[in-house]
Amino acid sequence: MVDLKSQYQNIKSEVDSAIANVIDNTAFINGPDVKSFQKNLEEYLSVKNVIPCGNGTDALQIAMMGLGLKPGDEVITANFTFVATVEVIALLGLTPVLVDVYPDTFTIDIDAIEKAITPKTKAIVPVHLFGQAADMEGIMQLADKYNLYVIEDTAQALGADYTFSDGRKEKVGTIGHVGTTSFFPSKNLGCYGDGGAIFTNGEDLSKKLRSIVNHGMKVRYYHDNVGVNSRLDTIQAAILDVKLKHLDTYNTNRRKAADFYDHAFSTCKHLQTPKRFENSNHIFHQYTLVLKDVDRTAFQNHLNEKGVSSAVYYPVPLHLQEAYKDSRYQKGDFPITEELCKSVMSLPIHTEMTEEDLKYITDSVLEFFK
Ligand SMILES: Cc1ncc(COP(=O)(O)O)c(C=O)c1O
């Protein structure tokens, strides 16, 4: 689904020297590259504080800990997402409240959020799924109205912009009270292992988050908060600092590949191409089709035989997952998510795709419908 090898080959000398430099200095934990990457990412995102951490799942957990959410508090999030979003809510003893998504953009449904709000609701976690923003203006209005925190899960959309109705543009992840991201290798900004970060413009909150990632310490061996051990390795930070300079080009390349797919599939009645929400510039972490009257398994087998990868993100809604079954929810409660889980399929999309690759993939896809 991604070609990390070609991407590495194109920046090999920069990456290799950044890694060698860390090994030379032996500052493996909280070395100078972590600070440098933090500063550069703050500048890139125009956000006051970036708190690097171990991965995107920890980032979500730490954000919720930093906001002081307590067992029993309800947290609303989208049912159609990667499990990490709900996993941390459950791990902290909070109550996940799932809501449906829009069938065309796959992001959280604003009316469904409002219907799910109760006196116990403390936070909303919109997920900027597959590379485009949820409707942040609507979400922030709801948050203001009901006095809720907003934690943006930006694991799949780092670098995407959100445009407000007054024309103001902001990077996703910096609009809510806290934003989180993942630097998992296949993400739009990926490192060579695990990595993540938290963003906030709040000064007191940033101090608390920075202490939580490091055992709740501000001063060594003095623990003000219950914390975790979730630091971004210096080697990963050094790699990310190199790759951050290329992020906008990477996102442009992904968008170009998506344009090619959109054009090739525009007249195929079996393929619904991903809708681009006008307030977000989609950066295509995934290129996800909705299949219409198609046997998905047979289609995937056909692509497999042609040597074309495909994947289903995500095959099972969270409320039907064994670990998250809950008497509050039954099959049929989330019709859009349930239908999407049956009908979505993603095609390869990455930063180094050539026109030849795209032509081969689109020809192979369309051949199935001949
Ligand atoms: C939407 C979403 N949230 C959270 C995560 C968790 O990130 P990580 O794998 O770095 O823990 C991911 C990673 O795939 C994700 O896609």
Image (spheres, rainbow, N blue to C red):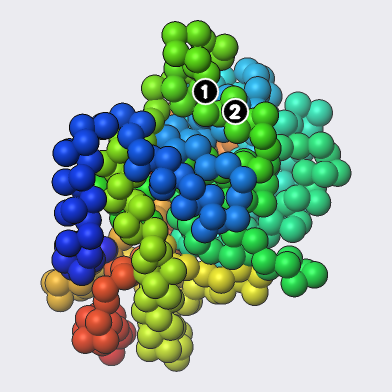
Is the Cβ of the residue at disc 1 closer than 8 Å to that at disc 2? yes
Residues 359 and 210: in front is 210
Quadrant of the frame with the N terminus:
bottom left
Secondary structure at numbered mark 2: helix
Q: Is residue 117 visible?
A: yes
**Mark 1: few/some/many CA within 10 Å (<14, 14-19, 20+):** many
Q: Quick one: which residue is furthest to the front in this view?
A: 25
Q: Is residue 239 above or below residue 292?
A: above
**Mark 2: few/some/many CA within 10 Å (<14, 14-19, 20+):** some
- In the rendered view, does 97 fall on the left or right side of 57? right
Q: x%, y% of residue 131?
A: 48, 62
Residues 66 and 47: in front is 47
Q: x%, y% of residue 30?
A: 36, 31
Residues 5 and 203: in front is 203
On whether ligand 1 comes within 8 Å of the CB at mark 2, the answer is no
Residue carrying label 1: 211
Residue carrying label 2: 207
Quadrant of the frame with the C terminus:
bottom left
Q: x%, y% of residue 250?
A: 37, 69
Instruction: Look at 30% across and 47% down and name the residue there.
Output: 238
Q: Amino acid at mark 1?
A: Ser
Q: Is residue 221 above or below residue 38?
A: above
Q: Is residue 263 above or below residue 102?
A: below
Instruction: Look at 20% across and 69% down and name the residue there.
Output: 10
